[in-house]
Image (tube, rainbow, N blue to C red):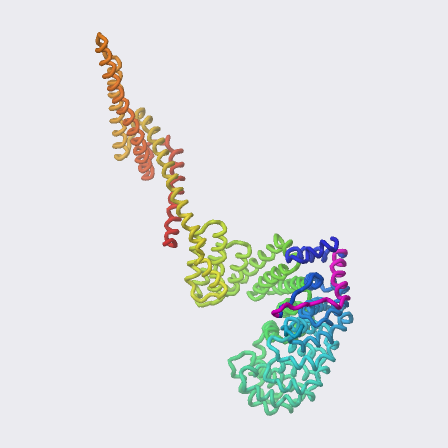
Amino acid sequence: MDKSELIKSLADYDSRREVVKAAIKDEEVRRSLFSLVEERAINKTLDIPMDYNGSMRIGRELDILLNAMDAVSEIGAWDSQLVQPIIPSVINLLDYEFYYTNKRAAEIIASAVNKDSIELIRPAIPKLTNLLEHREIIIEDTKIDNMDSVGNAQRALLFISVINCESLKDAIPKMMKYSDDYDSNIKDILQNISEQYCELLKPILPEIIEHLDNNEYIRIIGNVAQNDVETIKPAIPILIQQLDKPDFREESARVLGIIVEGNVGYVQSAIPKLIKLLDSSDEWVCVNAARSLKIVSQQDETLIRRLDSIIDNVSLFDEVCHLENTRDFYAYDLAFDAVNKNPNDPEALKAFGEMIGHNFNRFEFDLSTKSKLKAREKSIEYFKKSAEIKPTFETYEHIGSAYLLFWMDMGSAPEGGEIDGEIRQDLIRKSIYYSTKASELNPEDIECQLRIALNNNILRNYDEAISLLEELYQKDPDNHEVYGRLADFYVDAAKRLNEENNYYEAYEYLTKAKSIEDIYSSTREELDQMLEDENLKSKLKNQLNNLNSKIKTLTKERSEKFSESGEMAYSECIKDNPQLAPDAKTKLDEILAIDNLMSKTNQEMEKTKARKKKSGFLAKIGDAVSSTAKQGKLKVELYNLERKKKSAFTDFGEALWTSHKNGDDALQELSDIWQAIEKIEQQINKNEEEIENLNKYIK
């Protein structure tokens, strides 16, 4: 792929995806792509002109650079190792005070972070930290929002903190300044630092202590306390006060337990409050309070027994999952230690499988999708080991969930389109298999059955998915997840049926979705658009006309079959004189009467032709005129009798059909015709049902 072809392909999203896939597999394509970035990174004079209303106009060279950077970012997201050669040039691009390049450069650096790339990325850290301050940039006196660049810079710094937080030492004071930003990654960065290298936080501890009305900062204090209780001594009175506040008491009780291990005397004043928390309805508040109290209550045997009962009631897996939900990264270490000490403990195996799945960045210290997929496989492996030792609902449920997540992660890979077939479908089938095993052990679990329905929908088993959700809706009509998903499935089914030209069935599903009142706003918007679509209503009317036309044609075909059966039966009746039902006998008598009339008319016709002719010219002319007139009249009578006989055959055939349906099979010779008529009638009935359904929606 030469450069001109590469540049052209990068301009279109679908083509760019093909470039990304090619670059992942082919080093030459990758080099060509990287050179587009490197050439333009060296050129520091890329113009960014503004038009009269302040909008940026991107020139061709800059457009090529941005498209190439997007492709590089996608490659790094798949495999961080592949983009290492381009990182120095990307770091240079952070010198531009330009939203588009900063945003992409920070994104590429984030995608390149792994355990081997820290030294390569280290020069980017001060530039990324500097980006945190640039909420807005000014180009030609116009302010441009730069928060996407800030967000990507935070994300890159967060990934670096997972791998090597020591490299962020000089950036910490500046990061603390922006730690309270909405949806910020800074608190997570500080927490990672507090776990791995808490000494780095000492200069900003006073500021952290001022923020203890926040659980993230309380966790950070707890992490520091594990290494140096004296350092966080000023935080202890505030933590004791936080025991009175529902939002902070669980985390404060946990951290006080860490402090107690370092110095019992520091938390003596907290004991009455901790004892009071043992009666809390929140399980984890009780557990954390009990652990703190157990250290300071060695003499009170009654209290100790109560504390042991509370603590022993919590399984390792429950604790690991709870810690993960509170974003406490010690959960990984807790599970890791447990599985190393107890390699055949199903709880430890299950807990570690959970941690690998959620904290995949700790598994290989690589944040790419490729690493994520490896982590998913390893997670499932540990879950299955646990299930072999002790098959439980929870373990099977986690295997089913892990396979679904594996399917989702695989879809985000550059090769997603190529592997969207049998490989990914097999993951969904496995998810259904293990979710079904879980559901057999706990049939009342709604979440598990929801996953089975979702998986069936993914496999396009639409009827099965909808049927299962309808059953769940009947059991639990107030479950928002159930009826929200059911409405989604109804709308999806309507769209599919609309594409297949089954308009009335589509409308039927739309009506079902509309009957569910509280559904997702996006579903409601899509639903309303389809219900108000005049084009769909027009298609419904066209379908109604087509159905009526089909019924007309089928009715004609049925009449022809009745006539055929009547004619065939008449011959058999003349020959064998079978016993017929009264209605059929009446119709047969009518045919015989018509036959009798036709016979007489034919005889009269022959007499007219054979009548003796008179002599004389005028007499001959008169006889000829008279004979012709009479023959004409007789021919008309015969024609009318023929038509009447054909109609009588049809009536006779219909009477025999009715007799056949009532169980009277006097004429077995008609069985083939009966089968044909039965098929026609089935088609007529089906079309009539469709018309009835259509009429509900056409006013």
- Decide which of 414, 663 is in the foreground and name it: 414
Q: In the rendering, at what x and y percent does residue 243 appear?
A: 56, 86
Q: Quadrant of residue 271?
A: bottom right
- Decide which of 104, 664 is in the foreground and name it: 104
Q: Which residues are magenta?
A: 28-53
**Is 490 located above or below residue 317 in the figure?**
above
Residue at image location 60% in from the left, 75% down from the top: 183
Q: Is residue 237 magenta?
A: no
Q: Mark yes or no: residue 263 visible.
A: yes
> How many numbered circles does the render carry?
0
Q: Is residue 29 magenta?
A: yes
Q: Quadrant of residue 137?
A: bottom right
Image quarter where the C terminus lies is bottom left
Q: In the rendering, at what x and y percent does residue 73 appear?
A: 69, 64
Q: Mark yes or no: residue 362 visible.
A: no
- Decide which of 64, 489 is in the foreground and name it: 64
Q: In the rendering, at what x and y percent does residue 594 appear?
A: 26, 26
Q: In the rendering, at what x and y percent does residue 415 appear?
A: 66, 56
Residue sitting at the far top: 615
Q: Is residue 263 left or right of residue 532?
A: right
Q: Is residue 77 left or right of residue 308?
A: right
Q: Quadrant of residue 644?
A: top left
Residue sitting at the far front: 52
